[in-house]
Image (spheres, helix red, strand yellow):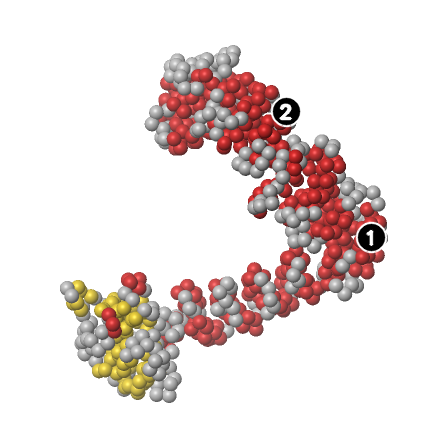
Amino acid sequence: MLKKDPQGRRIIPFGVPVLMFVTVIILASAGTMGPAHGAVPSGGLSHAVPVVSPVPETDAPDAIDLVSAMASIEPGVALQAIRIAGVLGPRAIEAAGPLMLDDDPRIARLARIALDRAVCGAREPVSVANALFRLLARCMEAPGLDEARKKEVAGQVLAWIGIVATEEHVPALEALFGDPMVGGDALAVVGTIPGRDALDALLTALSGKYPETLRIRAAQLLGDRPESGVIRPLLVASAGKPGPMGWPCLEALARHGVAPEQVFALPPTATATESSLYAHAALSAARALAKQGRQPIAERLFLGLLRHDAPPVIHRRALLGLSTLDNPDILHVALGCMNIPGVRASAIEALARVKAPGLEDRLNDAYRRADAPTRAGLLEVLSRRKAPGLAALLTKARLSDNPELRVKAVRLSGGTPSEADLLALAQRSNPWVRRKALADYFNLAETRLRQGEAEAAAAQYRNILTGAFAEEAMRAALYGLARAGRADDRSLMEARLDDPALGDEAWTLLTDALLAETDRNRARAELTRILPQADSPARRSLVSQALKTLGTTAEAVALKHGYPTRWRVLGPLPNRGGRAFGKSYYPASRTQVGPVFLDGRRLDWEDGEAEGLPARLVLKGRWDDCPEGACYALTEVVQTGETPVTIHVLTDGPFECWLNGAALVSRRGPRGEEGGDAGVKAVFRPGKNRILIKTLRSGEPWNCAVQITDRDGRPLPLRQPRE
């Protein structure tokens, strides 16, 4: 109910769009939405709606509240409308139902929520179901509604019908089985209705009258029915052989306690998927038989699954199922499964909870004769069974020469296994032992870190990084080593910089560790040293940002090492067959940078920046579309006086180089064919010195670097003019 003000007027605290005013018309005008409750709508699904007694009118104040709430233009009325819809039931469905088809998704969503509330709070389920059937007819006959939207809305309405439908609605639902749009949804609703009429409808759907997809769904639903009389029809529908109908019928029959071999035998040519389906059916049959009290047949099926090559999930479930029957053979079977990957925990669980007579003595006898891994599992079984004599066994096991047995005994005694034992187990081949040992090993290291024992924790992480462990363990050790914060361990991070799997983490962690270094000069030196290894833009950016944080830049580092970083580039230029070598597209003697006109095209100089160390100028983007081309690169260096230098041109392909307009050095072949990197002696004059390079590409990526050293090979710190 809505609150009232002192004058008795209703207060509407929320509001919806004006479009929702349509509901007022629906409620106020007879026949707009459809017939009154209990009547059958004309056309469409009229044959599917059962005629029932009319429902008394809902209280008038409630109806007024709904009209007011739905017609209000104030924002936020949705909550009030939904609250009232829960009270009105069928009237709310009549009012809000058509709005599910509204083009405005917000209005459609509000209507859906209101109907959901009306259905879930229904006080007259039959009247609500009738209203929903009328809404379903309207949805399926709605003009201009695309098939996907129509199917979605109809499916939602049928889901609501499934909440309130009773056996008297079965004929209406069965009439929809043949509809390709809603047949499957209607069948699913019938599957939830108890009673003979619903069962008969499902059996009818199983017959050959309907499409195969509907028959398959009917078989699945029949598998969940508690009534008798479904086994024979399912056997007939299966046709006694594997196939599209055979497999679902096999599983449905299994849920009624029919063993798979009673339906059909697994063919010798069965695929892995078919074998798995057959095994799952045997498992379902064994469970059903156990519930029916037919223990011998259930035991036979469980044991048969455990003796055959089946997926671990089948072995696990069969073991646990057998344990509920207290079968005396379970010890022998479970011991055989103790060392099967993915089954060990279930074998332990089964032995821990089974109540077979004389099992305690047999467990102790098996423990004395078992190998160490099996003993470790049996120790846990005996501990969970609170077996007498356990304390003596644990004391002796803690002194064993087998680390797995020692660790298990220490854990069961409430202690903490040693680091050495955990590390030894972490390198074992048994996956379940390795995973648990690694987890405990890392937990021990974390505990040490929290307690301030950084050196001990770091030693553990070093053991992982220097051992043969999986990528996940290596990654965890890298992060742990970084948290330990020891400068001596940074070399282990650096050793992983080129690791394909861990390289990115190693770069990030090493950079962070160097940023945490108290000696900023040392940190800058280390970052400068690893900068040449930064082989991707992301890694170069990472180091550059770190250097910037420490008060310098990657550009400053490159200049200090004799590498110009600011360039201007022109190209790409024609180079088919290497003809650009020796051909002048741009006069080297020109002192002013200007455009080049080539075949009616204008080419302008662009800014370029060399990155990393060596500071390479790498050209990408549109340059990649020119596998054979040439390019000019121009840089300037400022010197205060005349300086003898050596200029090293680092590029993969042929090139030509000029200094201050004069030819300096060239190489016609690829790098390596003519003596490697070119180093040529030159003299810088006071002021600006212009270095112009023309590089030729013949397939390799565009890249070029220039390093300037003194005559003794030491890098010459550079200064470049700022344009």
User: For the C terminus, which image quadrant?
Assistant: bottom left
Amino acid type, mark 1: Asn
Is residue 468 visible in the rendered structure shown here? Answer: yes
Determine which residue is flagged by label 1.
Answer: 364
Task: Kindly identify the residue that appears in the image at 37 percent across and 18 percent down.
Answer: 25
Q: Position of residue 401 (x, y in %)?
A: 76, 65
Label 2 element class? loop
Question: Foreground residue, 14 or 706?
Answer: 706
Question: Foreground residue, 682 or 697?
Answer: 697
Question: Foreground residue, 51 or 278?
Answer: 278
Residue 261 drawn above or below residue 30: below
Label for residue 229? Answer: 2
Exactly how many numbered labels are in the figure? Answer: 2
Q: Mark 1, residues whose alpha carbon is within 10 Å: few (<14), some, or many (≥20)?
A: some
Q: Position of residue 102 (x, y in %)?
A: 37, 28
* Distance Cα–Cα, label 1 vs label 2: 49 Å
Residue 596 drawn above or below residue 239: below
**Residue 375's quadrant in the figure?**
bottom right
Amino acid type, mark 2: Gly
Q: Position of residue 612 (x, y in %)?
A: 39, 71
Residue 217 drawn above or below residue 537: above
Q: Are marks 1 and 2 in contact (CB under 8 Å)?
A: no
Question: Foreground residue, 365 or 485?
Answer: 365
- Sequence order check, earlier mark of 1 and 2: 2
Task: Kindly identify the residue that appears in the image at 50 percent across and 31 percent down.
Answer: 212
Task: Kindly identify the residue that appears in the image at 70 percent across and 51 percent down.
Answer: 337
Label 1 element class? helix
